[in-house]
Image: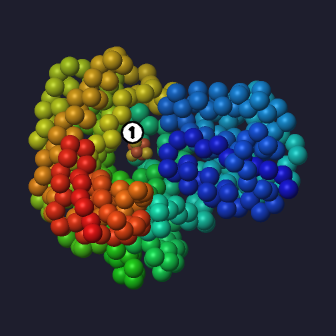
């Protein structure tokens, strides 16, 4: 049997896509050693120019180190750089997202170079799960995005939003729950758009999920502010909802939100976040600093606005250019060192807010332990805060209740006997 090695770049969605391909390889052997591979599948990322450079460097490196292996390009990069890499004979083959599930046949029957880009409307029939320990599962419920944020290439390489069928997802969850999985994390490219093409919605899916025996806690990877409707808000007090939402704001200046072609605005974002925080939720967000146009005045207003938001977690990114996006040609650009400083300022501010939140929410913590050894275990509570637990028992994959945690600078700590 020929051996296939997978090299995955980029986000969790790409990790899922690699799993889809692996699950379909019937006539090949999977190898973890690229040097013995006959085929090297490069599941690429193209989110920034830097990501393209890393993929190209890897491909070039493989043709030197491993000249007999066939290098096949898959993933988002196949839709942006596939054609040129194929024409330059840097790769033996290119497959687009819609072709993943045919990987076994493609590899088996193609002994000549091939360029099989497919379409961007397909949704895989394989619903992939990924497990952390034995009780937490990530489920990819949708693909693609209908938004057109000016800095983002994703819609042109992953297509518009489309959802997996509700019944298929529920069946999968039922199976996992009966095998002991209690926490489910819903993910996708734009998770909150779930259901719009299925006559369903995130709220409807959640309600049906919650009725499955064994489902104890549900998290949602990320939501856009405009996707949080009344039907969803009605679920916020349900015991099975993790008390943490990740709501992607990306910025707090209306000028920047407009430049970024976002659909949210600060005056509605603040109302929404306050309403959710009042229900006892921790709230995380994504935030891009250093996008063109973010001058000193804009930034000072933006950071003042962050101060009043009830945020507890942040994924802050320094803007990184992506060719073929509207932002790539925008001026004035912001210097890298300034963006770095803003990133530092923002993360320090949210860290302080998180500490404050944990001081107020350090009791009755429901912690799912993910891993640990030598008597020290780690997991997350319902607010998505990290808890370090000392115990003589083996707690891995257990749910435990911490009556009161000791709040430290970067995590909560507790003793469990
Ligand atoms: S919501 Fe915006 S940033 Fe997110 S994938 Fe869609 S276009 Fe890109």
Q: Which residue is mark 1?
A: 149
Taking the spot 17% from the left edge, 46% from the top edge, the residue there is 355
Seen in the picture, residue 219 relative to 263 is either above or below; the reply is below
Q: Residue furthest right?
A: 111
Looking at the image, which is closer to me, 402 or 119? 402
Classify residue 164 as left or right of residue 332.
Answer: right
Taking the spot 50% from the left edge, 55% from the top edge, the residue there is 143
Looking at the image, which is closer to me, 195 or 22? 22
Q: Is residue 3 visible?
A: yes
Seen in the picture, residue 214 relative to 290 is either above or below; the reply is below
Q: Residue 32 appears at what percent x and percent y? A: 69, 48
Q: Residue 150 appears at what percent x and percent y? A: 40, 34
Seen in the picture, residue 98 relative to 393 is either above or below; the reply is above
Mark 1 surroundings within 10 Å by alpha-carbon count, few (fewer than 14), some (14 through 19), many (20 or more): some
Q: Is mark 1 within 8 Å of ligand 1?
A: yes
Q: Quadrant of the C terminus?
A: bottom left
User: Ligand 1, what quadrant?
Assistant: top left
Q: Is residue 194 visible?
A: no
Q: Residue 197 appears at what percent x and percent y? A: 46, 64
Q: Residue 168 appears at what percent x and percent y? A: 53, 74
């Amino acid at each position: 049997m020929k051996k296939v090695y997978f090299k995955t770049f980029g986000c969790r969605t790409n990790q899922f896509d690699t799993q889809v391909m692996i699950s379909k390889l019937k006539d090949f052997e999977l190898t973890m050693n690229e040097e013995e591979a006959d085929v090297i599948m490069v599941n690429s990322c193209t989110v920034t120019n830097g990501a393209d450079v890393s993929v190209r460097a890897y491909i070039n490196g493989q043709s030197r180190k491993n000249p007999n292996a066939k290098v096949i390009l898959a993933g988002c990069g196949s839709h942006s750089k596939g054609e040129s890499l194929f024409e330059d004979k840097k790769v033996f083959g290119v497959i687009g997202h819609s072709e993943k599930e045919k990987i076994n046949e493609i590899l088996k029957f193609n002994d000549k170079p091939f360029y099989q880009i497919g379409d961007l409307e397909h949704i895989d029939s394989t619903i992939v799960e990924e497990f952390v320990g034995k009780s937490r599962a990530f489920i990819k419920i949708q693909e693609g995005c209908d938004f057109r944020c000016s800095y983002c290439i994703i819609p042109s390489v992953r297509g518009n939003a489309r959802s997996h069928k509700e019944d298929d997802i529920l069946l999968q969850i039922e199976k996992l729950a009966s095998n002991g999985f209690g926490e489910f994390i819903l993910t996708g490219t734009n998770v909150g758009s779930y259901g719009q093409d299925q006559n369903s919605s995130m709220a409807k899916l959640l309600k049906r999920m919650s009725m499955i025996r064994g489902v104890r806690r549900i998290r949602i990877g990320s939501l856009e502010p405009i996707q949080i409707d009344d039907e969803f808000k009605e679920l916020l007090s349900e015991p099975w909802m993790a008390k943490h939402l990740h709501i992607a704001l990306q910025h707090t200046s209306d000028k920047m939100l407009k430049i970024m072609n976002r659909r949210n605005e600060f005056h509605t974002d603040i109302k929404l976040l306050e309403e959710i925080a009042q229900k006892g939720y921790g709230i995380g967000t994504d935030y891009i600093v250093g996008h063109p146009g973010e001058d000193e005045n804009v930034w000072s207003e933006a950071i003042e606005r962050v101060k009043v938001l009830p945020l507890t977690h942040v994924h802050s990114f320094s803007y990184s250019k992506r060719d073929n996006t509207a932002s790539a040609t925008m001026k004035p650009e912001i210097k890298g060192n300034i963006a770095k400083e803003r990133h530092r300022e923002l993360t320090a501010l949210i860290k302080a807010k998180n500490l404050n939140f944990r001081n107020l929410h350090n009791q009755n913590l429901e912690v799912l332990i993910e891993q640990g050894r030598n008597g020290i275990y780690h997991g997350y509570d319902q607010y998505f805060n990290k808890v370090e637990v000392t115990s003589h028992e083996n707690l891995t994959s257990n749910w435990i209740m911490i009556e009161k945690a000791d709040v430290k600078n970067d995590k909560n700590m507790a003793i469990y006997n």
